[in-house]
């Protein structure tokens, strides 16, 4: 299944679990089950937005976006994190109100059965989605899967609290557990929002991916060939690597291009789908990035400013320059 198909399935499951959990809350009056139903509503909104962002991410490059739309998935993760944050605040508010005005709970057995059924459905789907997210390298799918797992643990906690109410008769356990659920949801929201922000900042590839790239380049390196300025980044499902390939100056352009193609193919075998940008240079030529050159110029200017006028070798404005040999 593709990422879009999983998200469509997530939408259908969210609608089903909302119906089950809302019915459970209606019969029992449990604020814990209400919090569970609210989180399923967030699941639905997140899945719909994630589906929209994944659809945008699959668009081909255009004139305004020549490098594609792959980063759209990060907006899905941030949006879902924000929705979870709002849900956590709503759950916390409802729980505090219930602590202030306790109410008896009814038909707990029916409510717990409905909650456990929806939990089983969410758990199975979340497990499948998380595996697919790793396979497709989709942060939108991962965000939805992790949100579903949060929903699963929320439901388990709510049912455990209701069992405690049945055994002890302490109705305050229900809102207290809802507050704990809200705190757990809040933690997941912050994690998702951090992941999306980090992705938009062009983070480097995972350490294992960088090691795979290094292994490929070492396989081609020789006294006549070397690689430097290796930089990696990830954008949604797409991975990129940029570096310089130094070849002997006597090589023809055709020979250098042939080697570059072999390196690209080796990288794609090691990391399927990676995009490599390789700059060819003679072995004895070093290039500098604009930022590095500007820093060097600034450092030289600062060194001149910091040099005291009376330092040895420094010219004095009061001392005329020494005439050259042969001059009067």
Image: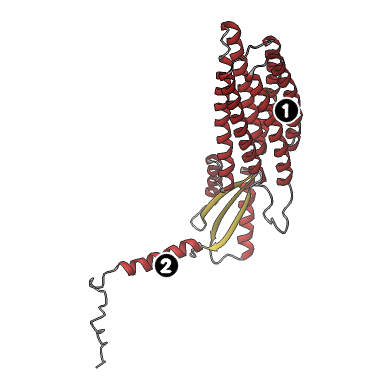
Q: Residue at x 61, y 66 (%)?
A: 252
> The C terminus is located in which quarter?
bottom left
Q: Earlier in the sequence, mark 1 or mark 2?
A: 1
Snapshot quadrant of residue 48: top right
Spot the residue most to the front: 101
Residue at disc 2, secondary structure: helix
Residue 312 vs residue 180: left or right? left
Spot the residue most to the top: 167
> The N terminus is located in which quarter?
top right
Q: Residue at x 52, y 41 (%)?
A: 207
Q: Which residue is mark 2?
A: 297
Give coordinates of residue 135: x percent, y percent. 66, 35
Q: Nearer the viewer, residue 44 or 90?
A: 90
Q: Residue at x 56, y 14 (%)?
A: 172
Could you classify mark 2 by the number of other residues whose Cα lies within 10 Å: few (under 14), some (14-19), or many (20 or more)? few
Q: Nearer the viewer, residue 114 or 132?
A: 114
Residue 228, relative to residue 144: is it above or below?
A: below
Residue at disc 1, secondary structure: helix
Label placed on residue 315: none
Residue 15 vs residue 313: left or right? right
The mark lying in front, picked from 1 and 2, is 1
Residue 81, relative to residue 282: is it above or below?
A: above
Visible in this render: residue 256? yes
Disc 1 from disc 2: Cα separation: 59 Å
Give coordinates of residue 123: x percent, y percent. 67, 23
Residue 183 vs residue 115: left or right? left
Q: Which residue is mark 1?
A: 14
Q: How many badges with numbers are in the image?
A: 2
């Amino acid at each position: 299944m593709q990422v879009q198909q999983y998200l469509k399935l997530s939408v259908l499951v969210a609608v089903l679990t909302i119906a089950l959990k809302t019915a459970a809350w209606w019969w029992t009056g449990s604020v814990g089950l209400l919090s569970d139903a609210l989180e399923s509503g967030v699941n639905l909104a997140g899945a719909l937005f994630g589906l929209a962002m994944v659809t945008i991410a699959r668009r081909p490059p255009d004139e305004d976006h020549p490098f594609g739309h792959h980063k759209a998935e990060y907006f899905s993760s941030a949006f879902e994190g924000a929705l979870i944050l709002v849900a956590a605040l709503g759950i916390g508010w409802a729980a505090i109100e219930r602590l202030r005005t306790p109410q008896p709970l009814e038909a707990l057995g029916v409510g717990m059965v409905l909650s456990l059924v929806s939990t089983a459905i969410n758990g199975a789907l979340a497990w499948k989605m998380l595996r697919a997210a790793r396979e497709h390298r989709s942060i939108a799918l991962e965000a939805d899967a992790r949100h579903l797992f949060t929903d699963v643990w929320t439901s388990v906690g709510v049912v455990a609290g209701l069992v405690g109410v049945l055994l002890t008769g302490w109705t305050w356990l229900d809102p207290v557990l809802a507050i704990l659920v809200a705190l757990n949801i809040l933690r997941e929201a912050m994690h998702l929002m951090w992941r999306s922000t980090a992705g938009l900042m062009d983070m480097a590839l995972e350490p294992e991916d960088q090691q795979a790239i290094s292994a490929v380049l070492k396989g081609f390196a020789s006294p006549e060939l070397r690689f430097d300025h290796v930089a990696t980044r990830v954008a949604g499902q797409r991975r990129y690597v940029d570096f310089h390939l130094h070849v002997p100056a006597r090589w023809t352009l055709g020979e250098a291009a042939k080697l570059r193609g072999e390196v690209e193919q080796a990288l794609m075998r090691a990391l399927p789908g990676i995009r490599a940008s390789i700059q060819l240079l003679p072995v004895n030529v070093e290039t500098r990035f604009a930022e590095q050159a500007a820093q060097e110029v600034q450092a030289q200017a600062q060194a001149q400013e910091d040099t005291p006028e009376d330092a040895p070798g420094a010219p004095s404005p009061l001392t005329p320059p020494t005439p050259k040999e042969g001059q009067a």
